[in-house]
Image: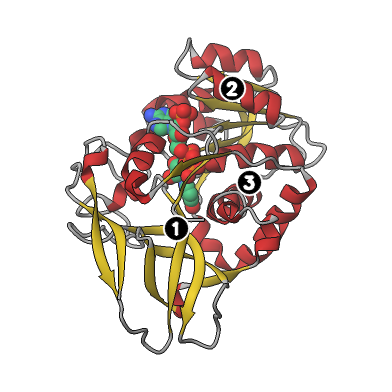
């Protein structure tokens, strides 16, 4: 038998409340003693906190593909770890594995069906990248741009990315540049994030939405208007971007984090002016979901891995240590405390 630490959901914020670390609590639990056929014991290396988890804090997530977290039950999400014991044919001790259903727990018994083996050389040993740039957020950026962005080499396009210093946004902007946009402008929540986008990641310009008027700053940084908009945030920031879009432009509707603490459906309704701008300028705005493109994930991971190894895409991470800080890290990410992917290191 093993004594482990795990995180359970303590209480819910309500559909329109802000999550706080006190909604989670850490407790001890016992794992084992026996593995069933088809199970492995994994040690958790890194856990992910992601915006969609805010919906899982509600009794009703509002999405049929997302189950709510149970009260007093162990929380789960993206994780990566190493196999310590195995009773299945497909996985051996020391294999590195990942899952979307990883318990927020230091060690756990898992069914092989829920796990995917990954090759550490794809990320040159940076195992946490499997939760970020070479994992689900990276695929979201890549497939979002490719499936909905209509980026065309030589077409002199300007791309705007909101939530640009986050896990998906920081990669999406770099992919926009690699795939041929002439100008890539990021919108994010601090001057330091703006500096990193331009100086470290090669964005053409960046706008801090917490300072000054977003519309005015965008006009300056996008003199030829906006052709492609990778939208992570929604709300008034997106209204300002869409108002400056060119005819026949494309909005990649990736996420709407500015609305996640509100009791509204997904995607949240648009104001009349924005709706009218989309129609009159023939701008496409299709909902994008990375899970709808499972058949493209394997090739996507290889592409992302290659770009990262070549240095064409730079990876940013904010790493917090310790399972006791899961709730703090989640709430911090929801408020912009992260630059790049927020991950939590659980063990070496
Ligand atoms: P991030 O790493 O971008 O973290 C969230 C960021 O959102 C924060 O860092 C913060 O940055 C920003 N933010 C928080 N509140 C607001 C607000 N009110 N207005 C503007 N920005 C805000 O998270 P991810 O990259 O994981 O996710 C980004 C988006 O992509 C989310 O909307 C998420 O739901 C979506 N997503 C969609 C997927 C899909 O398949 N469609 C898959 C994965 C993610 P700042 O300092 O700039 O405010």
Point out residue 71 in the picture as x, y percentages from the top left corner: 18, 57
Q: Position of residue 105 (x, y in %)?
A: 35, 60
Question: Considering the image in quadrants, where does the N terminus appear?
Answer: bottom left
Q: What distance separates the C-alpha of mark 2 from that of mark 1? A: 28 Å
Does the beta carbon of the residue at mark 3 sit less than 8 Å from ligand 1? no
Q: CA distance from mark 2 to mark 3?
A: 21 Å
Q: How is the image coloured?
A: secondary structure
SS class, disc 1: strand
User: Mark 3: few, some, or many residues within 10 Å (few <14, many ≥20)?
Assistant: many
Label 2 crowd (10 A; few <14 / some 14-19 / many >=20): many
Q: Nearer the viewer, residue 120 or 2?
A: 2
Question: Callout 2: helix, strand or loop?
Answer: helix
Q: Badge 2 is on which residue?
A: 194
Q: Quick one: which residue is furthest to the right in this view?
A: 154
**Which label lies toward us, 1 or 3?**
1
Q: Which residue is mark 1?
A: 78
Choose between 3 and 188: the one closer to the eye. Answer: 3
Residue that appears at 75% across and 54% down = 306
**Reading the chain from its start, which is encountered first: label 2 or label 3?**
3
Vertical comparison of 79 with 170: above or below:
below
Q: Is residue 323 left or right of residue 292?
A: left
Asked if residue 12 is positioned above or below residue 102 in the image, the reply reads: above
């Amino acid at each position: 038998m093993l004594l482990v630490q795990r995180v359970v959901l303590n209480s819910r914020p309500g559909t329109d409340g802000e999550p706080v670390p006190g909604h989670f609590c850490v407790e001890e639990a016992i794992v084992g003693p026996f593995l069933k056929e088809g199970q492995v014991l994994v040690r958790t290396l890194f856990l992910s906190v992601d915006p969609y988890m805010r919906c899982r804090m509600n009794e009703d997530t509002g999405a049929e593909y997302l189950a709510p977290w149970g009260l007093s039950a162990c929380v789960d999400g993206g994780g990566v770890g190493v196999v310590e014991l195995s009773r299945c044919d497909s996985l051996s001790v020391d294999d590195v594995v990942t899952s979307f259903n990883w318990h927020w727990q230091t060690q756990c018994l898992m069914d092989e069906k829920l796990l995917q083996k990954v090759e550490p050389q794809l990320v040159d040993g940076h195992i946490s990248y499997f939760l970020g740039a070479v994992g689900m957020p990276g695929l979201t950026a890549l497939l979002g741009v490719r499936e909905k962005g209509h980026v065309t080499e030589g077409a002199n396009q300007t791309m705007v990315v909101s939530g640009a210093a986050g896990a998906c946004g920081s990669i999406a902007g770099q992919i926009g540049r690699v795939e041929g946009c002439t100008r890539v402008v990021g919108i994010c929540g601090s001057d330091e994030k703006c500096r990193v986008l331009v100086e470290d990641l090669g964005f053409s310009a960046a706008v801090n939405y917490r300072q000054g008027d977003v519309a005015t700053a965008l006009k300056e940084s996008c003199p030829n208007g906006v052709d492609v908009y990778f939208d992570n945030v929604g709300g008034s920031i997106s209204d300002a971007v869409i108002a400056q879009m060119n005819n026949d432009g494309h909005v990649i509707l990736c996420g709407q984090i500015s609305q996640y603490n509100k009791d509204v459906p997904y995607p949240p309704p648009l104001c009349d002016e924005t709706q009218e701008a989309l129609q009159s300028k023939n701008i496409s705005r299709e909902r994008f979901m990375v899970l709808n493109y499972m058949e493209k994930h394997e090739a996507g991971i290889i592409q992302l891995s290659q770009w990262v190894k070549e240095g064409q895409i730079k990876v940013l991470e904010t790493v917090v240590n310790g399972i006791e800080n899961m709730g703090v890290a989640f709430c911090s990410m929801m408020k912009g405390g992260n630059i790049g992917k927020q991950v939590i290191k659980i063990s070496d």
